[in-house]
Image: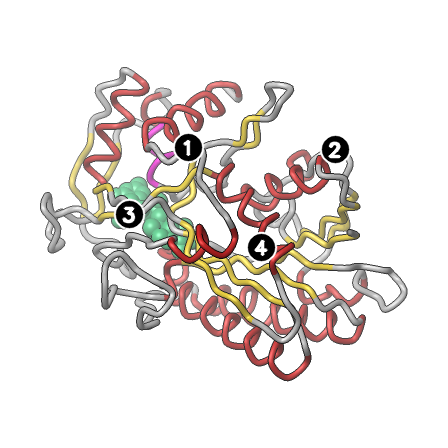
Amino acid sequence: MKVLVTGGAGYVGSAVARLLVDAGHEVVVLDDLSRNDASQVPAGARLVQARIHDAATVLTPDAGFDAVLHFAGLIAAGESMVQPELHWDNNTVGSLALLDAMRAAGVRRLVFSSTAATYGDPSELPLTENAVTKPVNTYGATKLAVDMAIASEAHAHELAAVSLRYFNVAGALVLPDGSMIGERHDPETHLIPIALQVAAGQREKLAIFGDDYPTPDGTCIRDYIHVGDLAQAHLLALEAARPGEHRVYNLGNGTGFSCKEVVDAVREVTGHPLPVEMAPRRPGDPAELVASSARARAELGWTPAKPDLRDIVADAWTFFRSGL
Ligand code: UFG
């Protein structure tokens, strides 16, 4: 297939782009490089530097694309609470422009990076795809709006679409030649990479945002998924998409870890004492997010290879040290 990978210079997008290249697909990456750099685009993929809003410049009717994998978007839930306009514009307005461009070009297959943040504070645990969607941060709301637009597009215009709702992605993709694709956000806002920065001596300590949540140790609980397992799910979703259907799959491992438990895992893997301090809650954080991925397992045949948090942290640490 000839595929357009939006956000293909980012953490998850570049990992999937790499697997697509390796599987023999022709890959074009669309990325504005606002949060990534070109070095993250995998060899074998062609980079077009443009905003998602301008997708139509690449996705022309005669370009011959078969499918789009849409990763481009802002991801920091905390940021979305203080600069919501950025998230609405990049995530929602940009995605609507992409859907228009796809319709005009006759490209009728889409895999979209949705998120566990669409659910908000869970109505049930573990979260199935039938759970109530009531986001508690703007980021989740912007992604839910796109999911709804994709559903309409699928039903009205025969789009074959899959939304993958990621839980907390971490770790690094280990390639057969030993090279790795890992997480390198600037600025970094995610728990595991920040903890690794402390372990590497780049930060003095880790601030844990809130210890008064209704969880056993008072800190937020998340379900961590290895980026390699997440990337594999995209290839399965690309094949599984059917015209006129919008399918939604949760991707996680079904086990929740509190922030304190994550810190313990990082201590174990790195051997660093990792000093922490308690800080106020970060706005927009649900107390607990844990996935049921039963549907992805049953319908996509998805089986995570690295479900263990320590393996996820260990790969993240190996990647992190490779950049020191
Ligand atoms: N946290 C800290 N200190 C930090 C950074 C994070 O205590 O320095 C806490 C957060 O408050 C939260 C937990 O660690 O309780 C995880 O936070 P992350 O920022 O690592 O991840 P989020 O859960 O906020 O969001 C991530 C992705 C979203 C996705 C969500 C789904 O960024 O795109 O997981 O669970 F929607």
Q: Residue furthest bottom?
A: 156
Q: Position of residue 102 (x, y in %)?
A: 73, 70
**Mark 3 and mark 1 in contact (Cβ < 8 Å)?**
no
Name the disc covering residue 222, or none: 3
Which of disc 3 and disc 1 is earlier in sequence?
Answer: 3
The residue type indicated by label 1 comes to: Lys
Front-most of residues 158 and 58: 158
- Most prominent secondary structure in the magenta stretch? helix
In-image side of 255 versus 89 (left or right): left
Among the 4 quarters of the image, the one containing residue 313: top left
- The mark lying in front, picked from 1 and 3, is 1
Marks 1 and 2, how far apart in space? Answer: 25 Å
Magenta residue span: 191-196
Which of disc 2 and disc 1 is earlier in sequence?
Answer: 2
- The mark lying in front, picked from 3 and 4, is 4
The residue lying at 66 percent from left, 37 percent from top is 18
Marks 2 and 3, how far apart in space? Answer: 33 Å
Does ligand 1 reach within 8 Å of label 3's beta carbon?
Answer: yes
Q: Which residue is mark 2?
A: 43
Q: Secondary structure at mark 1?
A: loop
The relative height of residue 256 versus residue 315 in the rendered view (above or below) is: below
In-image side of 276 versus 32 (left or right): left
Front-most of residues 71 and 302: 302
